[in-house]
Image (cartoon, rainbow, N blue to C red):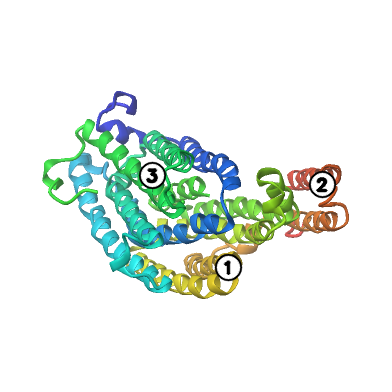
Amino acid sequence: MASEKDGSWVDGGSAANNSFGQTFKYLMATQFLSRLIPFIFNTWIVRHLTEADYALYAVKFHLLTTCILFLSREGFRRACMRIDIQCDGMMDANAARLLKIAWLTIPLGILFTSALCSFFFWIEKLSFQNAISDPNALAILINGFACILELLGEPLYILSQNLLLLKLRLMVETVATIARCMMTCTLMFRSTGMEMAIIFAVSQVSYGACLALGYWIYFLSFGIISSSFLFPFRLVFSPFEESSYTTFAKVASGDSPQKMMLLANSLTEALKLVSLIGLAAIAFGPSYSYCLIRLLYGKKWSDGQASTVLSCYCFYIISLAVNGTSESFLHAVANESQLIQSNLSLFLFSGIYILLNIIFVRSAGAFGLIAANSINMILRITYSALFIRRYFKGSSFSFLKSLPSGWIVLLLSGAVTLASEKLVLDRENFWHSFLIHLSIGLLCFCISAIVMYGLPSSMPLFF
């Protein structure tokens, strides 16, 4: 079998033997670049947007595209990753079987796009008859089209992930992200006269088109798609979650007599790490949200709701992190009937999430969006936790053991930094007081790190 460097079909096949560290490295690089590039871009572009334009870009359109893509593809991603296309020396046949399932994301995506765009039209009291003349209505339709474009590449994305073609994903997503940012800048600053809603929507189209074209060009170039399935119409903690899923699935499929113990240890360590990240966000995020917004976007944004919203978001992070790891475990070890039940629960929770968004966002704006997301994560964590408890029934696994040693020190640090923000930070005399406030935070962080690093993993829960 040739390596990926040689660019042959088996290229991806040999990658299946990559270590956990190698997998994590590429996934981490992908997520880092796909987040860092928009972050740098946003710190500059937000200064040229009104609050209404930014809400449109960061909340409304993001909610629409996220709901469409999640409902259309998440179940297929989880299910298809369990198919071993390299077994029995029948890679071509197994890949064809996988793609025949993955193609279903496209018609399902068109269905969900139509339904959710119509739903948004109804919520906003818009008319399809006036869609061409109404910028908001047209922008919703363009965003829906962008989602369909992105889903055109979904079957090949699933295939590439199964083959562990991680360099391909890194390149495609980086190029697509840069294309979206460049498109936004070009349309905004060349005096095109476009409405901001249309600019954001067209930029999303460029992102979806780049993703689809990237995967299609790669696979067609290397002749991976068999003509037998060319007839159909072709087409967001992620690296850690995917690496964890790979590890859980590998251990679960083994025949070791210590399989349950290995799975319990792997899940415990994974939950410890994500809990540590979430607790660190709770400890230091709320106290320094104002400072971060002030440094990145200026006084105009920091003195508004943005810093308060970011503080609330810091509490949401831990639920997001724990949910990703717990669901990765569920999808890695569950049998077919349990997976069906899980996917049905995801559809139910997604429906509840959309309903909560409508109610909460209208009544509480961005705070309502965070609340809706938090409730959604809690529901999904509860479902996964019940599954995990049943799975490890009679074993030594305990969720309490999944908390990082010395976690109470982080919470005490959070209390100290919150007091520092109230007593030390002066928004009118920002720079001088900020340096003192930052020094207190760094001191608390160092003490927490020293205490936690010095504690053995067998130390009791609180210390």
**Which disc, if any, is residue 207?**
3
Quadrant in which the N terminus appears? top left
Name the residue rendered at 51%, 68% in the picture: 376
Eyeballing the image, is 23 above or below 141? above
Q: Which residue is mark 2?
A: 430
Report the number of numbered marks.
3
C-alpha gap between disc 3 and disc 2: 39 Å
Q: Residue 214, how many percent across, how many down?
A: 32, 37
- Of mark 3 and mark 1, the one earlier in the sequence is 3
Q: Is residue 71 visible?
A: yes
- Which residue is nearer to you in this view: 341 or 269? 341
- The answer to whether 277 appears left or right of 129 in the picture is right
Dot 2: what SS? helix
Q: Secondary structure at mark 3?
A: helix
For label 1, count other residues whose C-alpha is less than 10 Å away and answer few (under 14), some (14-19) or many (20+): some
As drawn, the residue found furthest toward the top would be 6
- Amino acid beneath label 2: Phe
Earlier sequence position, callout 3 versus callout 2: 3
Image quadrant where one finds the C terminus: bottom right
**Which residue is located at x 39 percent, y 58 percent?**
135
Give above or below for 150 relative to 33. below
Residue 283 placement, left or right of 111: right
The type of residue carrying mark 3 is: Tyr
The picture places residue 73, in percent across and down from the top left corner, at: 34, 57
Packing grade of label 3 (10 A; few <14, some 14-19, many >=20) is many
What amino acid is at disc 1?
Gly
Q: Which residue corresponds to the image point at 32% horizontal and 40% vertical from the top-left?
A: 163
Image disc number at residue 28: none
State the SS at label 1: loop
Q: Which mark is residue 365?
A: 1
